[in-house]
Amino acid sequence: MTDDWLSLSDAAKLLGVHPSTIRLWSDKGALPVHKTQGGHRRYKRGEILLWAESNSRSGEDALEPEGMMQEVVKNVRMQISEGRLQEESWYQKLDDEARSQYRMSARSLFQGLMNYMLTNGEEAENEAYAIGYEYASRARRYQLSYVDAAKAFLFFRDTLVESVVKVYTEANVPSKKATEMYTRMHTFTDDILISLLETYSKLENANH
């Protein structure tokens, strides 16, 4: 009985967590997993029970920022690819090259946030300034107003926040831990927005 093979959903039921949590733990190497020739995840009941017994701290430690942020980025890419950008007024003003640049700029925001979470905020001020500068200079290059520059940043920021909420909810992250994450995220992204507006103003004044 203990050598029964379980699917990902079966393992999730056994441990009482969401399937996305099992997938995350497996990909991080925190949970013993076997792959079929077709690439499907399979679990041995005995190994899962033993893991649960030795890791009775509710799995909270397995939900490290790195793994969670990787899940978030996947979710963000999915949302952006669903065409939400096409509805944005600032995006409609851009040509194909500029649109490509803005889609790439989303990556710098996600990467910056990931670095911020993994380094416990070290160098956060420099990181926030650099990302804000990038968004401001790109907006100036493509002749967007400072309002549109802010709208572009907030679009990517809000998409990111929505994805974090979704991933953390599905992974059953304790509310205290999730609240701490949201607070740190908003602090970091607020600093980026301030840097964006300050940089845009300086670039505009420099051209007068």
Image (cartoon, helix red, strand yellow):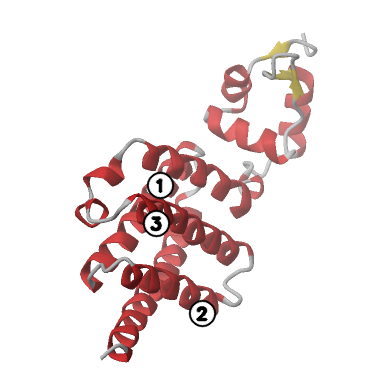
Label 3 amino acid?
Answer: Tyr
Of the image marks 2 and 3, the number of the one nearer the N terminus: 3
Of the image marks 1 and 3, the number of the one nearer the N terminus: 3
Quadrant into which the C terminus falls:
bottom left
Is 192 situated left or right of 28 in this image? Answer: left
Q: Which mark is residue 70?
A: none
Q: Which residue is mark 2?
A: 125
Quarter of the figure with residue 154: bottom left
Mark nearer the viewer, 1 or 3: 3
Label 1, label 3: how far apart the Cα atoms are = 23 Å
Q: Which residue is mark 1?
A: 165
The location of residue 192, given as percent across then percent down, is 41, 72
The location of residue 53, given as percent across then percent down, is 74, 33
- Does any portion of residue 132 appear in the rendered image? yes
Quadrant into which the N terminus falls:
top right
The location of residue 168, given as percent across then percent down, is 47, 45
Q: Which residue is mark 3?
A: 102
Q: Is residue 8 above or below residue 73?
A: above
